[in-house]
Image: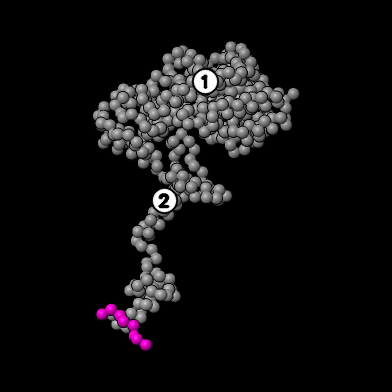
């Protein structure tokens, strides 16, 4: 037999060893082989270890900070993301990133630092979304209308910066242009719930809190992304919603209050109305239940407090707006200072003695941030009021239905943007059906 021929310089033993190495796998894992072995591979490179340590730090730092008492701040006009449930399947992993981002300690300070650096060094607000257009010239002094010296806007933004430093919530625009649910469907669900409430022997009232961008439109910038579609959707919404016989259009009352008080009912750097708006909705609800109820009401401004602006916080700034506090004397004699807005979203039960200017009936008030903020003022009109944040409709609509089944009047206070965008939890199909069933099971005689 002819011996195999190997290239010059390669011995028979070396060739056979190489042949064995390449034709069979080693008995040990690659990382356990000698470093000089041809198949040796390190188990983890320095880069892999760095990435692993960074991932562990990213996800477990929030837990460590909670353990030492450091709590993340809610500064984005929404609740922080909750820890995902293991029952969510793959949604557990996608939700974990959102939870970790929201609960990063001192994230509000980081946003503030980014804003200060951007404005102090570059003369412009930080970009919270990826820019899609040309970059304009640096402005050393902000113009009265900040949109005029900027490139044409090409994306929705969290905060619309208006004239004279007025700020507006970007969701006012985005929800109008890209609603989660068509307006016609939302209006149909409102009508479905109204019919169910009235069929159960109760009165139904829907008070729509206008957007700040609706009531203080003169301070909107001349140019902002979504301007045309937002205005079209807004105008169509108000034309349609006021046709519902149970809807309270608060716009005239807010304009009258502004003229009477000489100030806007909306804060300059916050997305909500002030106690001026709370008084307007309280009087409107009382009159809708029984006209003439508020004839004896006497209101008096008793204090002013500084409220941190939730919109300026989104830009990394810390500002406050002066907000007046009032007392209400339903009978015209005995005024009482209204309690401050609630610090949590749990159900509340408020009562008072009967008297002039007070309706002797039970009311259920459901509201979003506008309604929950105003609920203590609405409570001045009734002897018995049960108050629930609208998030209760998302968590347990049957429980909300049972709460409302104990009342004579169902009052829903909803922000315009939440109705326009189709994101008001109480008007989801499942919630409407659950609440309707609970009311039907316990009709008022």
Residue at left offset 36%, top offset 62%: 45
Residue 205 as seen in the image, left or right of residue 97: right
Residue at left offset 39%, top offset 54%: 54
Does residue 290 show up magenta in the picture? no
Dot in front, 2 or 1: 1
Where is the C terminus found, in terms of image quarters? top right
Magenta stretch bounds: 1-9
Q: Is mark 1 on a helix, strand or loop?
A: helix
Q: Which residue lies furthest to the bottom in this view?
A: 1
Q: Which quarter of the picture shows residue 70?
A: top left
Q: Where is residue 370 in the image (x, y as percent from the top left)?
A: 51, 27
How would you rate the neighbour count of disc 2 (Cα within 10 Å): few for under 14, some for 14-19, many for 20 or more?
A: some
Q: Which quarter of the picture shows residue 363?
A: top right
Marks 2 and 1 in Cβ contact (< 8 Å): no
The dot on residue 58 is: 2
Q: How far apart are marks 2 and 1 (CA)?
A: 46 Å
Residue 303 visible within the image: no
Q: Where is residue 133 in the image (x, y as percent from the top left)?
A: 32, 34
Asked whether 422 or 46 is in front, the reply is 422
Residue at left offset 29%, top offset 38%: 117
Asked whether 314 or 338 is in front, the reply is 314
Residue 258 visible within the image: yes
Q: What element carries label 2?
A: helix
Asked whether 36 or 330 is in front, the reply is 36
Q: Position of residue 405 (x, y in %)?
A: 68, 30
**What residue does disc 1 label?**
238
Does residue 7 show up magenta in the picture? yes
């Amino acid at each position: 037999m002819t011996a195999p021929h190997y290239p010059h310089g390669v011995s028979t033993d070396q060739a056979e060893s190489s042949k064995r190495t390449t034709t069979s796998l080693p008995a040990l894992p690659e990382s356990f082989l000698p470093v000089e072995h041809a198949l040796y591979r390190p188990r983890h490179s320095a880069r892999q270890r760095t990435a692993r340590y960074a991932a562990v730090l990213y996800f477990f730092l929030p837990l460590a900070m909670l353990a030492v008492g450091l709590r993340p701040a809610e500064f984005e006009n929404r609740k922080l993301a909750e820890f995902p449930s293991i029952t969510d399947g793959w949604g557990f992993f996608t939700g974990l990133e959102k939870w970790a981002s929201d609960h990063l300690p001192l994230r509000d300070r980081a946003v503030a630092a980014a804003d200060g650096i951007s404005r102090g060094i570059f003369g412009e607000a930080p970009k919270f979304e990826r820019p899609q257009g040309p970059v304009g010239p640096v402005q050393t002094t902000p113009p009265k209308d900040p949109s005029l010296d900027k490139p044409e806007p090409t994306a929705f933004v969290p905060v619309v910066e208006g004239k004279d430093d007025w700020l507006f919530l970007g969701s006012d625009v985005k929800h109008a242009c890209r609603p989660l649910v068509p307006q016609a469907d939302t209006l149909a669900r409102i009508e479905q719930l109204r019919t169910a409430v009235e069929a159960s022997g109760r009165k139904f009232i829907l008070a729509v809190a206008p957007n700040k961008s609706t009531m203080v439109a003169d301070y909107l910038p001349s140019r902002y992304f979504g301007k045309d579609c937002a205005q079209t959707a807004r105008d169509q919404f108000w034309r349609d919603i006021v046709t519902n016989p149970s809807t309270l259009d608060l716009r005239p009352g807010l304009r009258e209050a502004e003229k009477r008080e000489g100030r806007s009912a909306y804060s300059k750097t916050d997305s909500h109305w002030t106690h001026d708006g709370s008084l307007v909705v309280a009087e409107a609800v009382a009159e809708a239940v029984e006209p003439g109820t508020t004839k004896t009401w006497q209101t008096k401004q008793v204090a002013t407090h500084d409220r941190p602006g939730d919109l300026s916080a989104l830009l990394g700034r810390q500002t406050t707006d002066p907000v007046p506090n009032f007392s209400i004397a339903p009978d015209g004699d005995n005024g009482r200072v209204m309690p401050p807005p609630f610090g949590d979203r749990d159900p509340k039960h408020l009562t008072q003695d009967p008297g002039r200017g007070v309706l002797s009936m039970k009311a259920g008030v459901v509201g979003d941030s506008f309604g929950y903020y105003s609920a203590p003022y609405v409570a001045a009109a009734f002897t018995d009021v049960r108050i629930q944040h609208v998030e209760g409709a998302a968590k347990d609509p049957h429980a909300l239905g049972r709460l409302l089944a104990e009342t004579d009047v169902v009052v829903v206070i909803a922000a315009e943007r939440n109705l326009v965008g189709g994101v008001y939890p109480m008007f989801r199909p499942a919630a409407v059906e659950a609440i309707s069933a609970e009311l039907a099971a316990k009709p008022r005689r």
